[in-house]
């Protein structure tokens, strides 16, 4: 480059990763039938530093619990397939910006 000078421009876009529903995907239903499509109910987010989820059946019995964002519910409880129907979830997500997001609702298991 014997004396040649070059210039360039770099554009940096900063996204505000807010601790809210817009950055936390909570599936409303899943179909654990072994076809490889939608077999696992799993939270997806890019703002979490840690989280906790609990799922209960209609009798108030906890059928799933996890603190691992990579682990989802496969629709089984004590090694047996859970019935089709509605299940309640309670979710707490601790976000990178020190905020906390809480959600509760229902998910549908479809066989």
Image (cartoon, rainbow, N blue to C red):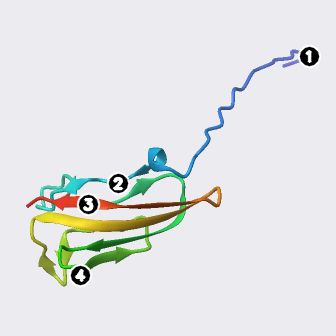
How many marks overall?
A: 4
Quadrant of residue 32 in the image? bottom left
Q: Position of residue 97 (x, y in %)?
A: 65, 56
Q: Nearer the viewer, mark 4 or mark 1?
A: 4
In whole angstroms, how far apart are the C-alphas of marks 3 and 4? 14 Å
Q: Residues within 10 Å of mark 4 (few under 14, many from 20)?
A: few
Quadrant of residue 53 in the image? bottom left
Mark earlier in primary sequence (3, 1)? 1
In whole angstroms, how far apart are the C-alphas of marks 2 and 4? 21 Å
- Which numbered disc covers residue 106? 3
Q: Nearer the viewer, residue 79 or 106?
A: 106
Does 14 appear above or below 27?
A: above
Which quarter of the rendered picture does the C terminus lie within? Answer: bottom left
Q: Position of residue 29 (x, y in %)?
A: 21, 55
Q: Secondary structure at mark 2?
A: loop
Q: Answer yes or no: do the residues labelled 2 and 1 have beta carbons within 8 Å?
A: no
**Residue visible at 9% across and 70% down?**
83
Residue placed furthest toward the top: 4
* Residue ID for mark 1: 3
* Residue ID for mark 4: 61
**Residue visible at 15% across and 57% down?**
31
Q: Nearer the viewer, mark 3 or mark 1?
A: 3
Q: Nearer the viewer, residue 36 or 8?
A: 36
Q: Nearer the viewer, mark 2 or mark 4?
A: 4
Mark earlier in primary sequence (2, 4)? 2
Q: Secondary structure at mark 3?
A: strand
* Residue ID for mark 2: 26
In whole angstroms, how far apart are the C-alphas of marks 3 and 1? 67 Å
Does 25 appear above or below 68?
A: above
Mark earlier in primary sequence (3, 2)? 2
Does 102 appear above or below 1?
A: below
Q: Residues within 10 Å of mark 2 (few under 14, many from 20)?
A: some
């Amino acid at each position: 480059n014997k004396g040649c000078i070059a210039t360039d421009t770099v554009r940096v876009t900063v996204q505000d990763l807010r601790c809210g529903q817009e950055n936390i995907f909570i599936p409303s239903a899943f179909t654990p039938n072994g076809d490889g499509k939608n077999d696992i109910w799993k939270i997806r987010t890019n703002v979490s530093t840690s989280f906790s989820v609990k799922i209960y059946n209609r009798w108030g019995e906890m059928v799933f619990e996890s603190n691992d964002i990579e682990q989802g519910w496969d629709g089984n409880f004590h090694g047996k397939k859970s019935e089709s129907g509605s299940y309640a979830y309670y979710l707490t997500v601790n976000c990178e910006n020190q905020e906390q997001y809480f959600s509760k609702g229902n998910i549908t298991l479809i066989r």
